[in-house]
Structure formats: C-alpha cells, structure tokens
Image: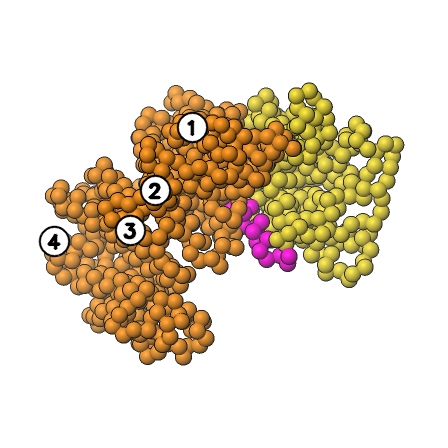
Chain colours: A orange, B yellow
Amino acid sequence: MTDTIKDTTPAPTVSAAGLIPLPENIARALTVGGGLLTCVGAFLAWTWTSEFPGDLTYYGSPAGLQWLAFTAGLLTVLFALAGYGIKGLGWLTPAGGTTAPIVLSAFAGLGVTWFSLISIATELGGVANWVVGGVLAGLFSAVPVIGALALPKPGPATVRGKDSLKATLAAYVAKPERTKPTAILPGWQQRGIIAVVIGLGLLVFTYGIDTEGGELFSGFLIVTLLGAWALHSSGLLDRFSAISAGNRSYAMTLAFVAAAVFPFTQNNDHDANVGVNILIFGTVALGLNIVVGLTGLLDLGYVAFLGVGAYAAALVSGSEYSTISGTTFPFWAAALTGAAASLIFGVLIGAPTLRLRGDYLAIVTLGFGEIFRIVVRNLDGSSGPDVTNGPNGIAAIPDLSIGSFNFGENHTFAGFTLGRFANYYLLMLIVTVVVVLVFNRASDSRIGRAWVAIREDETAATAMGINGFRVKLIAFALGASLAGLAGTVSAHVTNNVVPDPYVFAGPVAPNSAFLLAAVVLGGMGTVSGPLLGAALLYLIPEKLEFLQEYQLFAFGIALIILMRFRPEGVIANRRRQLEFHEAEEPTEPAAPAAPATAGV
Amino acid sequence: MNTLPQQLANGLFLGSMYGLIAIGYTMVYGIVQLINFAHGEIFMTGGFGALTVWFALPSGTSMWVALPLMLIGGAVVAVLIATGAERFAYRPLRNAPRLAPLITAIGLSLALQEAVRNWYPKATDARVFPQIDAGPWHIGSISFSSGDLFVIIAAPLCMGALAGFVRSTRTGRAMQATAQDPDTAQLMGIDTNRVIVIAFAIGGLFAAVASVAYGLRYGQIKYDMGFQAGLKAFTAAVLGGIGNIYGAMLGGLVLGVAEALASAYIANIPGMEQFGGGGWTSVWAFVLLILVLLLRPQGLLGERVADRA
C-alpha cells in the first residue's frame, strides 16, 4: 500500500505552490493541527446563555452544533494524516489526491463554526455574546483552511499568476482524474464495509430528521453536504459504490433493514410522520423517474395519478363520507383498485399523446393535472354528479388493519413502541421496496433497454425494430400505476383526501413541481437519486420554516440552474451523464485515459 | 342575454385573447421546436408591467391616455423577460437533449410565478385592474364591454401587422427560412440567433396585449393567471396547427367559441345536465385538445408533420 501512495503524491514543484504562500511542511502541519484545534474548539463554551437553541454554554461538553464542528474537525484530521502518507491511512483516499478532501472538510468545520457564531450574534444581538470560547473556536476553525489552501495546488501545473482565482479554487476541490489501483478485498471485508457504511448512513439520516430548530439543521446541512463532497473527492464514494455493486442484493437487503430499523430509533411519532412522508414522496418520485429518467418523457401531471389512487382507495375504504360507503375493500384489493384506476387514466391520457412528439405529452399531462383537480372539485353533487364530495373531500378514512394488526394503534415490540405513523412507515417501506424492485428489474429488462434507446434516439430505436409507441405507453402506464399504489397508502396515512394538494405547484409537498424537482435534483435514471432528492426537498422546508414561502421559487431556479450546469443531478447515472454532456465532449479521442483502467 | 349570437360573440372575444397568446407558442415552436411553457407566465408579467405603469401615473389620469402607456409598459416587461429567457435559459441548451429545455421552461414558469407572488406588492391575491369608463354597448341582441371592444380591435390589428411583417419584410422572410431549415438558413447568411430572439420578442409583445385585454375584461389580474391561460392558448395553437401563425389565431377563435357554447349549451344535451356551466369549460377545452391530438394531430391548418422526431 505504501508504494502506491508514494506514486500518487505529486512531487512538490515550484509551479504548484499553494494559494497561500507557506512551505508545504508547515501547511501540512497546519491542516493536522488545525483539525485537532477545531475538535478542541467544539469542547469550549461558545456563548454564555442557554437562550441560544441547543445550549452551547458548557466547557468540556459539546452540544448540537458543536458536535457537528467536532465531526468536521475529525474528518479534517483523518484526511490531513492521510496527506502525510501515513501507513494504513491510504484507504481514505482511493482517488489519489488528498488536497481536495482536506480543503472541503476544513471548509465544513469553518462553515459550521462561523454559521453558529453568526447566528449567535444575530439572534442574541451582537458579537459580545461570543464568549472567549466562541472566539477561540472561530479562530481554530480557520487554521485548517489556511493550511489546506497553502498545500501545493493539485492538478496540472500552470504558471502562477495566469490562473484566475476561480480556476485555482476549482483545482483545489476537484476530484483527481486518475485512480489508484485498489486491492480486491476479501468478501467478508466487503460485506463488513457495506454494513458499516449503511449503519453510518442511518445514523446521519436519523440525526438529520431528529434535529430540533433551524440553526441545528442548517449546520447539519453544511457539514453533511461539504462532508459528502469531501468523501466524493477522496474517491471513497466511488469505491463504496464499486464494492456495493459487487454485492448488490446484500447491500439492498441491508439498506432495507436499516430503513426498517429507523422507526425503532424514534421516540415520537412526529418524526415517524416525517419519515413516512419522505417515503411516500420518494416512492412517487421513483415512479416518475421511470417516465422521466428512463424513458425521457416529461410528465408534468404526475401527482394527479397519485390523486387518482388516493381517491380510489378512499372511495372503497369504508369511510362514511365515501359516496359508496357501504363498500370496504381489504387493503390488498384497495391497493390494486388504486393502481388499476391510475393505470386506466394513464392509458387514456397516454394513448392519444404518445404517438406524437414528447413535448405534447408534457403539456397534455400538465393539463390533465389541472383538469383532475377541477373535476374532483366539481363532482360534489351540485355542479356535477356526486362522487368525490367536491372541495370537502372524503374525510374519516378508517385506519388500515391487516389481520388483527390495526395500523391506527400503538404496538409494542420487544420494548419499542411503534405509533400510528411508524406502522404506516413500515407498510410504506414495503411499497417502496416493491417499487425499487420493479424499477430495477424493469430497467435491466428488454423493455428497460428499449426505454433508454427511445430516450437517446427515438428514430434510431424505431429503426432497430422497437415499437416506440407501445414501449412508451408501457412506461407511462407503469409510472401511473406505481403512483396510484403509493396514493392508496397516502390516503390512509392522512385520513382524508381533498383536491387541493394535487396541483402542479402548491405550498405543500405532493405537487408535480416538487416531484419533478426531486427527480432532477437527485439524478434522473437512478434509484437512490429521487429518494435522496425527495428527502432533501421535503426536509429542508420542513425544518427551515422561513424558506417555505420561497420553496417553489427555489425549485424553479434550481431546475433552471441544474439543467444548465448539472443536468444529470447529484447522483449521476453514468450513461445519462454522457448523454447530457455529449455536446461538450472534446472532438479528439481521449486516448491517454485508457491505461488508467488497466489496474481495476 | 343567453342567446346564441351573444354566446358566439363572447366566444370571439375570448378566442381573440387566446389567439394572441397562442401566437407566442406557435412562433417559438415553429422556429426552435420548443414549447415555451413559461409563455403563460410571460403573459402574466405583461399584465403586471401594465399595472405598474398605471400606478406610476398621477391618479385621475384618463384611461384614454393611460391605456397606450400601459400597453407600452406591459410590452417592455414581457419582451424583456421573453428575450432574457431565450438568451440566458434556452440558448445555452440548444444542443442539449430535448428534456433539458423543457425542464428549464417549467422551472422558469415556476420561478416567474413565484417571484411575482412573493415580491410584487400585494400580489398574493388578485389585483384590481383599471377599467375604461365606457360602455357596455349593444348591437341587436349582443352586448359587449369596453374590454371586449379592445380585444376585438387589437387582435386583428396585431394579426394583420404580423402577417405583413412575416410576408414582406427582410426579417420576416428570414424567419420563414429559419423555420423551414435553420442550418441552411444560417449558411445563407441569416443570423438565426437574431431571428430566434425576434420570435420570442413578438411572442412577448402579443402576450402583453393579451394580458391588458385580460385585465380589462375581467377587471383583475393574478399571479397564477398565466397557468390556465397558457394551457388554453397552447390548446389553441395545437388546434390551429402548431407552427402556423394563422392557425394560432383560428385555433384561438375556435376554442373560444367552443368554450362559450359548451358552457351555455352542454347542459341541454340529455344526460349531460350536470356538466354545463362555467366550472366545466376548462374540462371541455381539455377534452377538445385530446380529441384534436387523436383525430387531427397536425391541427386545422397545420402542414407540419406533428411527430417529426
């Protein structure tokens, strides 16, 4: 291992001097020491009064934001030590360079510390509220950043002074191009790594959902996003996805177990409610991803299919407000009814439109989303036949019960009490797994390949003998029925269905704009992308209430910016990424890249 | 009042407005094959631009003075936003996969709507639009308001000017050439970027006229009025044959008349008693769109093959 590290550490040259002029050995010492200091700073008292949320007033006992700073400091120390080429830490940076992870994790520490200090100053009125500890922590957190920026500039050496500041900074956070040859680990180690990583993921996710107050959640976002970026630039994330790709079913099972453990870690049902909502919206976004991400059809009325499923389930739920209140279907039948109703509407909308260009589908689905709401409002008995009770909706949908298990009651398993939302969370998790399986199996099947072919070039795909219309209709109808399935659960979770949430753009989560933004932000054509996107887009306005007014504006701007600069989303599907950047590819063949793959 | 001539006239007034908006969809589509979802919102910002001019004028200004200024103000805002969207949002994506500009368009539409709602003074609810203090007039059994008069005069004027522009000016012929074959047009020395910007600008201009007509007809404008109006106008553009400017106007008129007749007469059809009235008009417009796509996807006047890949 040590040999490979020597290979990849760039030889210090004069032209590669750092942004801040310091000798390299001092810079390295600063990164390690600064990381340690950031950790120490977390143990100081940052303010004098417990009025600031989280109570940061104790020496020796970090709380909330301070733990986040501590985590960032620890990450910096680890990467900085790896930068020394210390034996046994080489695995931390499989991508080769250590500078980018150091820079990013140092910035995570700086960011969360100064964010806390600034919110202390603004909320308590003035910088006098930073006691000595706060000032020290602020200074400490700057040390590793100075050290990191004094490291030699990674990447191709350019004559100093010719680079713009922007290009220099970009070089500091860029992931190295080459990858170190990595040893193939024994199977039990691979599975161990997967287990540890998924456990850590559960821990981070649970921490994020449980955070109290906007300050802590903002700090959490700063550290998680910069930390994840640091891990990505170190190559650890790629390494992990390579390992888990080799153990796919094992990793999926563990992820499912981790998700199932989540409600047991919660002691109040509100957090389980957040969890179940994330699952519902994530699952619906995943269904939309079949249509948008795999097949490349823009469906702007997707939430209407969720609504069809929800209304269908509500009508057969046995609610006394249902217009066919005598009928009570068992859950499996209700779920099938919801999915089938959405399927029928999907075919009705898709059949005339999918013969034409994709743009027509976009606007017809946009219209369908709007018409669905209008029709549901009108079917109230006075302006139309009485089916849906109009704007009042169908209330008092009874809780599900499967066998003797009533979802509305608390249940105790081995000392853990599961509340109503936790029960539904587990049920929804099963639906999510079904959708994930459908997505994976479909995308690897003959039909899934046909979808991708259609997305890339419909004319060529048709010439190869694919029946474009039929394949597109299958994708569209499948997406619709998956949304209908999720809708049946969501009707029971919320206890009632009303027309208003099923709009194109609205203040509460299940609207088509939200779902589209979740898919696009997360990554089109991937499984984890829409789930991550839905979790982020749901949690951020939920935790940071002042953002709620502006969330739709932010969605709009985010869609424009993403399409311009990163159309493949946070989690990129490799093929999709190449497709989106086709126009930017250099025309000369990139021959030198080939030998790098030899060692893998 | 609910006579057939009155309903036909209502349909024509409404349809002229749809037609004016539909021009924006159809011109942009004809040249860059892009459905500009944000066009409904450009229409909406035109209305707010005109309203801003009204507030800037000294109170008590006669509408006869104010109206031209408001038209100019609305047009400036709508044209700036339309061309700005083209320049900064759509142009960088011209060679990207088809999905990218569509998603950008939908993002732009959300952002514009929310920007007006959040930052235009008191725009979270409908804002009252100034009215011309004249009319209503009666001709036979038909009665019409000053807003109706405005749109029935403005729409043919705009349409005639556009037809003349496209047919007989140099730029207009450059537009026709670009619509037929952008690459060849560029080789022949046509600045296609300029042509595209002009197409967006004309769309914005007509949308501004339509939004003033909307304000005069309904007496109020709202941040989300572009959504439904945009959908209807797109339906009109498809109905007439997307890419065809005469088709857009014709489609608007047909759609307007169809809506007026549907809301007045559908309840008279046996078995459909409950589906008449204003609440269902949008539904019938949508059904019409689906029927057109099913039976005649190239539209009434369209020559363009609708499923060109």
Q: Nearer the viewer, mark 1 or mark 3?
A: 1
Residue B302 visible to an observer of this rendering: no
Label 1: chain? A
Q: Nearer the viewer, mark 2 or mark 3?
A: 2
Mark 4 on the same chain as mark 2: yes
Mark 4 or mark 3: whose residue is earlier in sequence? 4
The residue to which callout 1 is attached is A329
* Residue depicted at 45% across the width and 54% down the height: A541
Within the image, what quadrant is residue B240 found in?
Answer: top right
The residue to which callout 3 is attached is A265
Q: Which residues are magenta?
A: B105-122
Q: Tell me the SS state at disc 2.
A: helix
Q: Residues within 10 Å of mark 2 (few under 14, many from 20)?
A: many
Mark 4 on the same chain as mark 3: yes
Mark 2 or mark 1: whose residue is earlier in sequence? 1
The residue to which callout 2 is attached is A423
Contact (Cβ within 8 Å) of mark 4 with mark 3: no
